[in-house]
Image (cartoon, rainbow, N blue to C red):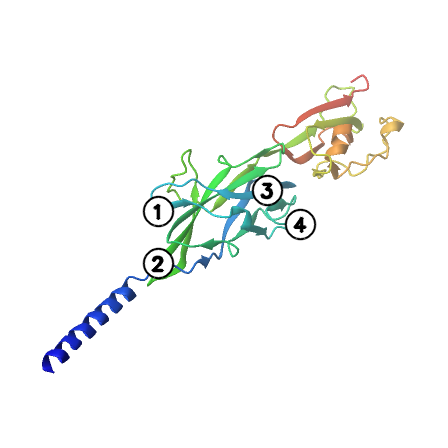
Amino acid sequence: MKKISRLTGIALAVAMIIALASISAAAFTYTPVNGTTTTFTTEITGDAVPNWTATYAVSAGEAGYETVHAGPNPESVTLTNNSTTGTGGTVTFVAGGASSFTVTVNFSAVSFSEPGVYRYVITQTPAEKLGVTPDTSATRILDVYVQDNNGALEIQSYDFLLSTANFLSTAKSTGFTNTYAVQDLTVSKAVSGTQASRDKYFEFTVVVTGLTGTDEFAVDISNADATSGTTASTIAANQGKQNPTGATGAELAAGVKFYLQHGQSITIKNLPVGAHYTVTENAENY
């Protein structure tokens, strides 16, 4: 009986070992985790903010080292921004308004099933605009870090990086920096000679081309009269004429008239660098 009991005990022990081995050998799989949100900025630097738009899009990046993977489901990544009239991935700058906006990248509809680095590319497509120089790089890398936390997946962090030809950059970035270069145009009048009339008003026509028709440009007339006078030396056609305090791109393309005496001037503000201008004076034999 003792011998039989001992054999029975050995059989039970072996069965338990086999059962434990079966439990320990069960396959382990991660429960996928969805992404969260991160942000980047887009800005205009320079002396002025123009009416201008830039559109941003997300695509899968290139796999790199063993743990760097092309980002899955880029079509499920959504973009929003806080510009005044912009929607989705299109950021709208308004002349005279804010020079910087935030774009939110939402990965909540993207599922990550393994630890690693998941690489995406953010591309900026700028609208063509005279005076605007877009960021020197049209793309940025956005890496999503997914880590194993005691067997559970979690989003560790996001890295926004300057891109390179092989997408292996490690230089961090905060977003896209675009520049807008402007200059003022001043038109002044001077007369000389003992027979010259310094109270006479002369007519000038300023034409500026290359501008967006709906853009508005302020005109500083603080060194001129708001309305030309009726001096005896001024021809009737130039008397009682208003000097405008602003003009649109379309009006400047067609030609805007100003009326100046000796020593007076007007200044058209914040014309984009690259615009072309012509100033014509009705000299009246002077």
Which residue occupies 13% across, 79% down? 4
Front position among marks 3 and 1:
1
Quarter of image, res 239: top right
Q: Is residue 256 above or below residue 39?
A: above
Q: Which mark is residue 85?
A: 4
Residue neighbourhood size for the residue with mark 4, other residues' Cα within 10 Å, grouped as few (<14), some (14–19), many (≥20): few
Q: Earlier in the sequence, mark 3 or mark 1?
A: 3
Residue neighbourhood size for the residue with mark 3, other residues' Cα within 10 Å, grouped as few (<14), some (14–19), many (≥20): some
Quarter of image, res 154: bottom left
Q: Nearer the viewer, residue 185 or 233?
A: 185
Visible residue check, residue 255: no
Q: Which amino acid type corresponds to the residue marked 4 in the rendered image?
A: Thr
- Give the Cα separation between the discs numbered 2 and 4: 41 Å
Which residue occupies 63% across, 40% down? 52
Tell me the element at label 3.
strand
Q: Which amino acid type corresponds to the residue marked 3 in the rendered image?
A: Thr
Q: Nearer the viewer, residue 235 or 217?
A: 217
Q: Earlier in the sequence, mark 3 or mark 2?
A: 3
Which residue matches tag 1?
67
Q: Earlier in the sequence, mark 1 or mark 4?
A: 1
